[in-house]
Amino acid sequence: MDKKKLSVLFIICMANSLIYTLPYIQSTYYDSMQAAYGFTHVQMGNLVSAYGIFNIFSNFFGGVAADAFDTKKLFVFSMIATGVSGLYSATLPSYPVMLAINVFWSVSTTLTFWSAMIKAVKNLADDAHQGQVFGFKETICCIITFVFSMAALAVFRLTGENFVILLVLYSVMHILIGVLVAIFMPSLPPEGKPQLYGLVKGIGAVIRLKGVWLIGMTIFFTQFAAIIFGRFTPFLTGIGGLSASTVAFITIVAANGFANIGSLSGGKISDAMGSPSKFIACVLGVTALITVAFLFIPWGSETVWLCVLVAVVFRILNGALRSVQFATMSQVNIPPQLIGTASGIISIIGYLPDIFGYTLCGMAMEKFRPIIAYKIIFTGLVVCCLVGMMISLTLHRYSKHSRNTVAGI
């Protein structure tokens, strides 16, 4: 990758590293957020579920928006709008207002950003190097997120674990990155003048692609697994007895430090295998085996650091999955002018677990005593991995038979 493309990728990664910190901040600061707002476990889950529900519409229209508008303008709006709304969330509004803010975040982080980001990254490499470019993107994002997150954690600790100050800090960072994107990111206008009929026809063409559905379902189960990985934050405080700041440190290091091992090597290995979907199947299989073993560990303060080790390994595997899940688009014949639309449809399918995954985990945590609740949650992880492995292998076989055809277009 030349220096010009690398600089563009770095700018994309700066935006991508921050854009989802506010909607998913409970993954790192669950207990502190719950204490600040006074929400129940179910309400905490519902916040992300509301975000996920409206992401269905945001992904649908976001794919069209990515093919119809300048990517740079979409990026700038996304960063600044998310930052401003984040400042309002720092006033600790009521539960209904926080639900509304999460709905708005589905617009500012998904409709105007996600598909535009996928399209921008995919345009930086040919089909033979999609795994590497997406893996490299994930690695750079992890490094940037790690730096930002450690700075935020330091402020969090210095202020006596003040969650409001943390929200303000992240919100201001969003706005500043938005300004930097406006100054330094080159424009990526749509290919030709968008026509409503052509866009609608493109949606229909993409929906008819079997490969698009297989990619979406593969991501569906990797995303469900990622949601369960995030439950290690309350697990290590509630079951392991670690402090909120200690668990936040572990989560940041695991998710943005050790995950680099998975994301950087994942892209290279999947390209060497010649099939991102086959690589995903292997990672899901390994994750299922580790999870089965983890279920037989006697959980508690005596084994907390063994549990931390498992959490770190899961983050490495999650990094590998995230690095190549959209590289699977190279295995399906999608016309270049419909990449944004295709990524939107795939994201609708793939991120459906955001609608119910967090709420289901919250319900289990409230209905059952802690040990039983986490046994249920991590058993669900095994099921997700096994089903996802079968679907990704189906995608691998499908791509081998249809690599040189464009179905229905």
Image (cartoon, helix red, strand yellow):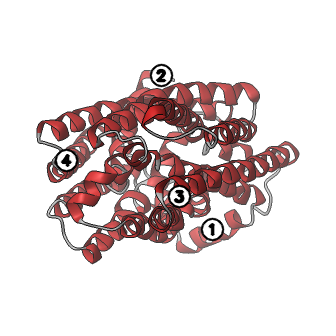
Amino acid at the residue labelled 4: Leu
Q: CA distance from mark 2 to mark 3?
A: 50 Å
Q: Which mark is residue 203?
A: 1
Crowdedness of circle 4 by 10 Å Cα count: few (<14), some, many (20+)?
A: many
Marks 4, 2: nearer the viewer: 4
Q: Is residue 111 above or below residue 333?
A: below
Distance (Cα) linking label 4 and label 2 = 37 Å
Instruction: Quickly name the residue at label 3.
Output: 373
Residue 245 percent across, percent down from the top left: 27, 39
Q: Residue furthest left?
A: 159
| Rendered position, 40 above or below 72 | below
Count up the numbered dots.
4
Tag 2–tag 3 contact (CB < 8 Å): no
- Which label number is shown at residue 305? none
- First-in-chain label (3 vs 4): 4
Q: Which mark is residue 166?
A: 4
Q: Nearer the viewer, residue 370 or 403?
A: 370
Q: Determine which residue is flagged by label 2.
A: 2
The reply to whether callout 4 and callout 2 are in contact (CB within 8 Å) is no
Question: What crowding class fits label 1: few (fewer than 14 Cα within 10 Å), some (14-19), or many (20 or more)?
Answer: some
> SS for tag 3?
helix
x 75%, y 55%: residue: 211
